[in-house]
Amino acid sequence: MIRKSAIRFVSVHPLRAADAMQRAAAFVASERRPVSLSAVTLHDRLAEAMRKEGFPLIGTEFA
């Protein structure tokens, strides 16, 4: 399930494979409801992808 989600994220967002896997793992952990799980990242591309997918982000004011 994580691999399948990561493949989709790579095709939709400008992410590297490892970033897409991290993003996909968070998606699966949130039980496919991104708004239910806050995320923390200082990686600009990953933060933007997570924001677009609906994850609330913590600490982005420091990025």
Image: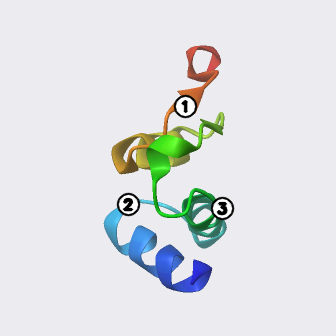
Q: Nearer the viewer, residue 4 or 38?
A: 38
Labels 1 & 2 near each other (Cβ < 8 A): no
Left/right placement of residue 30 relative to residue 33 reads right
- Residue 42 sits in which quadrant? top right
**Which element type, helix, strand or loop, lies under badge 3?**
helix
Say whether marks 3 and 1 touch (CB < 8 Å). no
**Image x and y of residue 41, in percent:** 65, 37
Give the CA separation, mark 1 to mark 2: 17 Å
Residue 31 at x, y percent in the picture: 55, 63
Q: Where is residue 15 in the image (x, y as percent from the top left)?
A: 49, 61
Mark 2 lies on residue = 13
For badge 3, the amino acid type reads Gln
Residue 35 in the image, given as x and y percentages of width and height: 46, 42
Using the image as rendered, state which of residue 10 and residue 5 is in the foreground: 5
Q: Which amino acid does label 2 sit on?
A: His
> Which residue is disc 3 drawn over?
22
**Alpha carbons under labels 2 and 3: distance apart:** 13 Å
As shown in the figure, which amino acid type bears the numbered disc 1?
A: Leu
